[in-house]
Amino acid sequence: MRRPAGTGALRTAILMGTAAVLLAVWTVPVLWAVLTSVKNEKEVLAYPPTIAFDATIKNFREVLTGPTNIVPNLTSSLIIAVATTILTIVIAVPAAYAFARLKLPGRKPLGFYVLATQLVPPIGLIIPYFLIMNRIGWMDSYRGLVLIYLTFSLPFAIWLLVSYFEDIPREMEEAALLDRASRWQAFWHVVLPQARGAIGVTVVFVFLNAWNEFLFAVILGGATVKPVTVSMYNYINTEQTQWAQLAAAALMAMLPVIVLGIAAQKHIVAGLSAGAVKGVTRR
Amino acid sequence: MTPAERLAVAERPERRFALALAAPAVAVLAITTTFPLVYLLWQSLQNINLAMPGMDRFAGAENYVRMWEDRRFWGALGFTVVYTGVTVALQLVIGLGMALLILQIPRAQWAFRIVAIIPIVLAPVVAGLFWRTLMLAPDFGILDFAFRSLGFGAHNWLGDPRLARVSVIAIHTWQWTPFVFLYLLAALAALPADLYEAARIDRASAWRRFVHITLPLIRPAIVIVVILRITVALSAFAAIYAATGGGPGTATEIINLYAYRVSFAELSLGYGASAAVVLLVLTMAVAALLFHLRRAG
């Protein structure tokens, strides 16, 4: 059966049209932020909005060097995200290996425990943390925020790594053990080098989530430790919103994760869902 | 020694090594999550109000009784269900539709893959702020402008209770549909092509091919993505906080926002804790149900 002439072209046109609309829906908010960030005060407030204008980098200069600049906040976020990532990897990698490969006593209940901790709603943690941190004097401190960030990064990293460890072939590890390598040597010299890619993906995810976190930061942070997600509110107050500076600050704040996200694009979705596909509770 | 005993002895070093590797993680999780949750439970039985320091006292079930009678709590619970149900359904339908569409235009796939990553990596608070200011603000946002230019008139997107609910649902859907899209695109791309060929030869219509071949094959992927999206929607906070703060009034309060405002704006940490306990129980129950369904299916 042949299609009537023209149907194919119409079908293509409809497909392309729909695709273009969808592309617009998902790009416009971010593109508009980019445009707004390079406008001057007058053009920002122009209504109807203008697309052609004199571009300026003034807003970015203001956000990076002005009186309310976000450089301390970027630094805070960097310290917290790096510390969280390092601690998470150091603790999660051995645990994931034990879950995935070794005869771990109580493996199933422990697996469920890790899974359950991942599902705990953040609001259920921040309320007790607020009182506890107040009592022990850890408010507005790096250690306080890094500690609470472990609550979401650790279960997630363990899940993710278990699914990767399960995919690494056993042969080399078994050969090393036959050669009288200790368990630790086999783990350190044979398994870890093969898991480098998996650890890399985990680093990206943990860093991203720690960088983007807001609820814990807004409550446990303060004048000294104020992550960049919270500092967005420097540009919004009751009298007025500094639209262009807000857009510039938000873009500066999101630049690291956008670059990281696009660079690690292929692994993002596979990684985010790996835990659910396999996970600790399998077997 | 019986063989079983000998095996147990032989495995002893491995078991010990495994425990040593897993112990730090379990210990850290016990200290950072289990202990605070026990504290939360205790807190929910106390009357703690930061505005009245020194007046803390044991309240038993008082907070829970008060919550049972609090219409605002029931409103928040109701909107939590609506918010979760609607955003997840929209993400699934739009995401699956997009994935099927993009499979038809292989040349455009790379563009969609990159564009889809950006909302996913954006901090929810930034997504909420972008929408609140750049998209929806009256006399400023471009979506507002687009609606006016198309003759739909001016709307107070985040100031009108009904529109505000629609807006926060739209924001969450905007941010997370790309995740469902990318996930299902990967699942669809992994399907064997010869199945389709056979169906095409049998002259099955596109719709029938979809319902009878594609859908059953990607069912496991759909189930997983739905579970993931439900758990994320149940812990949503920052985007709504940034867009409406739970308002106008209490219109866009999901339980997270409700517990937050009660605890940190009204400073009743005991009462807020009891709301958080309810959310915790709800989340665990939904997760248990979903995992059970997944096993059974």
Image (tube, coloured by chain):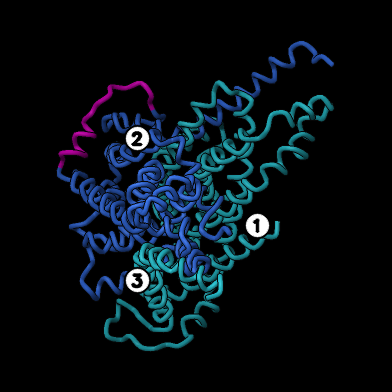
Residue at numbered disc 3 = B31
For disc 1, the marked residue is B294
Q: Which residue is mark 2?
A: A259
User: Residue most toward the front?
Assistant: B1
Task: Choose between B19 and A86: the one closer to the eye.
Answer: B19
Q: Residue at x 46, y 76 (%)?
A: B274
Label 1 neighbour load within 10 Å: few <14, some 14-19, many 20+: few
Identity of the residue drawn at 34% across and 56% down? A184
Q: Amino acid type of disc 3? A: Ile
Subunit that carries the residue with mark 3: B
Circles 2 and 1, Cβ within 8 Å, touching? The answer is no
Q: Is residue B250 left or right of residue A74?
A: right
Q: Few, some or many C-alpha atoms within 10 Å of disc 3 (few <14, some 14-19, many ≥20)?
A: some
* Residue B125 visible at all: no
Tell me where the magenta segment starts and ends, as one range.
A50-66
- The shade of chain A is blue
Rounded to the nearest angstrom, the CA distance separating label 1 from label 3 is 31 Å
Chain B in the picture: what colour? Answer: cyan
Alpha carbon separation for disc pair 3 and 2: 34 Å
- Can you see residue A149? yes
In the image, what residue type sits under mark 1?
A: Arg
Local secondary structure at mark 1: helix
| Marks 1 and 3, the one that precedes in the sequence | 3
Total number of numbered discs in the rendering: 3
